[in-house]
Structure formats: C-alpha cells, structure tokens
Amino acid sequence: MGSGLPNPLVGAERVDSSSMADRLLNGNVTGMDVSVVDVAIIGAGPYGLGLATYLRRRGIEHRIFGPPMQAWRDMAPGMYLKSQAFATSIATPQPGFTLPEYCLARGLEEREPIEIGEFARYGLWTQQQLVPYVEEPKVTELTRRHDHFALTLETGEEMRARRVVVATGLSYCERMPGVLRELPREIASHTADHGDFTSFAGSSVIVIGGGQSALQAAALLHENGARVRIVVRQEVRWAGKGRQRTLLDRVQAPNSVLGYGKANWVLQHVPMLMHYLPMELRLRFTREHLGPGGAWWLRDRVVGKFPVQQHCEVRGAVIKQGKICLRVRARGIGERDMLADHVIAGTGYQVDVDRLAFINQELAREIRRVERAPMLSRHFETSVRGLYFIGPASAASFGPLFRFVAGAAYAAPAVARHLAERSSATASFGQRPVGIPASVHIDHVRYG
C-alpha cells in the first residue's frame, strides 16, 4: 500500500533514482551527506510519527530518531488502553490510518478495551506505511551551536539540525515517591520498569497508587500468582460503563476523545483555549482534571480479588533482611509497618526538563519552565528558538488533552504548519532550508 507522500529529505517529487530521500528510504546511505537537516524529531511514538507525516506532506526535510512505539511495545502483555479506539489514533493527514479502521480491516474488536500490544502493532504498521525512514538509534546528546543544533546518536554519528522537535512521550519522567528514590530498583521499581509480571509469582508485592497503571499492574500481578495489595492515598475512582444515551444525555454531556462532558468536549474542539488561561488556573485544572482512576472493565479484576488499602500514606521505607518495609499511615488508624518482597510505584509521571538525559545541561538551563516542564509558545516552541516539545511535555502549557495520544491531532499539524512558515520565511530571504539541494524544486504533493 503506497503512502502517497513526498520523500522526507527532499520535499519534492523524486529528482532521480540516487536522490538522498530514495537512498534513505532504501537503506542505502553510503557516501550520502545527511549530517545536516532542516528538522530533527527526537522520538518515534504517536506524536513523533504523526508530526513526520505532516512534515512529509508539506515537503519539509526531516529525520526522525528512536525505536518506533518503543514505550508501548515494552508494556506487559495483558495491559489494555483506557481510552477508546476512536480517541487513540495516530494523527496523519492521510486517510485510512485510524485505529478503528485498522481494527475493522483485520476483524479485530474496536470497542474498549483494546490491548496495548495491538495498539503498538497498529503504530508500527502506520510507521512502516507512512514513515518507513525512521532511524532507530536514540539521540544521546542535544546541544545548541550558534544557529543550529548538534545531535549525537548512540551509534556515535553526529549531525546538525536547524530545528528540533522533542517527542519522547513519558520516557525519563517516571515519578517515584521520595521515600523510594534511593532504594535499588531490584526491590522498589516503577510500573514503567516492567514488561512482564510473571517473575513475581509467589512473591509478596505492594503496589502504590490508584491510577490505571497501578490498578492494571496489581491485577496482572495477582493473575500471575503474586500476593499483592494496593496502597493508595485516596479512594479508588472507577469510571462508569458506557450505556445507551438519550438525545438529552448527548446534549448535556457530549462525547469526546477525553470522554463524556462539556469540559472534555471543549478541550478537544477548542484545544488552544487552555494556553491562554492564566498559568495558575491552567496548571491547577491540568493537575485535577481527569485524575487517577480505573476503567470500568478493570474493576472486576481488582475489587474483591486482593486487599486495596485506601486513605493510606507511605511515610518511610527501609530494607530489612532482603525485604522492603514500608511505614504507612492509615487515616483514623495511625502508623504501621508493611513488609513485602517488592514495591511497585504506580504513581504516574512528572515532566522535568532536567531529567531528559540527552539534553545538554547548558541548553537545558536556557529553557524557561512552567514548574519543571518547558514553557511553550502557541507554536509549541520553547524559549530557545527552534526547539519544540510536543506530547505530555506540552500539557503544562496547553492543558490535559496533550497528556493523551488524542492531543497529536492538533499538535502535529500545528507544529508542521509553523515549521513550514519558518522555512518559507527563510527561503524568502534567499536561503533554502538546510540540506535541500538548490537544484531541487519544492512542490507540495496533494493527496488524491
């Protein structure tokens, strides 16, 4: 199946069979100078892949780095999406590439829950069809040098880019409770560390947290033979199962990619609104809206299957004779010790520029922050000209929609449009985008 998209390194129809784009797509890079590029995308998950398809459509030269859909592929078998299929598609201007269409074409169930492994396979299929030139080596260092950025890959290759878009998702952002941070990961880990729970059979495990990842991890641990219990600060909240909705229901609580409710509908259909709210109001709303909780279909795998100790706060943790001992304060009861072979924190994520190990410290210091996240313009650009962030890292500037895959439907075309405008402005002053040969005529290829 052809993609109908122009080649990514030329931004035009094919010039000849030995053009840079042809050779990159065919895997032949011998003697090929691709060390300078207009746009580099760091991360090949849903946001990075979506952006690449829009850049190809506009004929903007780019390279994209990282193992495609890695975070999703690394999740444990038996984990499912909390969101619905129509709300979890990779954003692309090319028709026929939504998750529901992928499922229907293969006779797969398109109603929730959808296995995360299937979503990862869908993402890989989309990548192979539309972005086959993804380069799997990760970026290990990003620095700024004068009028461009310098990137070093884990292979040792060095290259330059005029603009860089960071789309690394939640990688590097796992939030560990303070009392667990100094403990070895062999005994205190995060849900993101585990792609398989079978090794915990026969072990006692405490899971901290009441969100979807914590609840799913606990269910899988139990189903794989672990003796598990959950410790959570608040009462666990469960989403209600969908039902046949009347016209009045649909008016009062319209459906959206974020679920039912007028606020969710506005977030989807007016995605820039949150960006223009006062910062404190936006941050408070982003923290509180769509907070931790479990999907309706997960409830029967948790409730009554193992202890769920609510209104409990972990106050301390020490290792005793090879086990971990948590000091837990329960509301109305007081403090007591809990002993286990292992503790898994399902305590979510926190975007922190300083934890993105590939960003040079000097460059990181130049990035203005909203709390620890990058402060972004309406074009998703940081205070460092030419450096952009999309995905969960943009939620502090744009609101909760961008914590989810669905946010790419706005972010990917918006960033591509801004990058194209910058490229046009540069060209209008007699300079071509870096890396595009002067002999190449740039035409925008339209979709049929």
Image (cartoon, grey):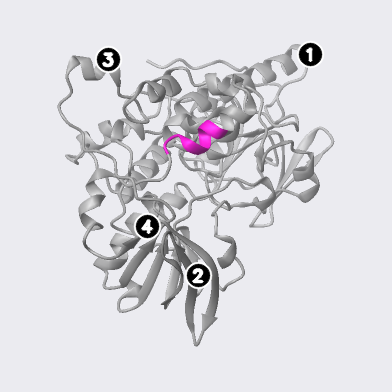
Name the residue tied to disc 2: 188
Furthest toward the bottom, the residue is: 321
In front of the other: label 3 or label 2?
Answer: 3
Q: Is residue 312 visible?
A: yes
Distance from Cα at disc 4 to Cα at disc 3: 35 Å
The dot on residue 420 is none
- Residue name at image x 74 percent, y 31 percent: 383
Instruction: Give the residues drawn in magenta, as a range.
Output: 284-290
Name the residue tied to disc 3: 251
Magenta: main secondary structure equals helix
- Residue name at image x 67 percent, y 33 percent: 375
Quarter-of-image position of residue 394: top right
In the image, 416: left or right of 85? right
Label whose residue precedes the other's in the sequence (4 or 2): 2
| Residue type at the position of mark 1 | Phe
Q: Residue 237 location in percent, x, y?
A: 33, 45
Q: Residue 196 location in percent, x, y?
A: 36, 65
Quarter-of-image position of residue 97: top left
The dot on residue 310 is 4
Label whose residue precedes the other's in the sequence (4 or 1): 4
In the image, 107: left or right of 19? left
Name the residue tied to disc 1: 429
Distance from Cα at disc 4 to Cα at disc 1: 63 Å
- Give SS at disc 1: loop
Distance from Cα at disc 3 to Cα at disc 2: 47 Å
Does the residue at mark 2 contact the one at mark 1 (Cβ under 8 Å)? no
| Residue type at the position of mark 4 | Gln
- Residue name at image x 59 percent, y 23 percent: 275
Q: Residue 435 location in percent, x, y?
A: 69, 31
In front of the other: label 4 or label 2?
Answer: 4
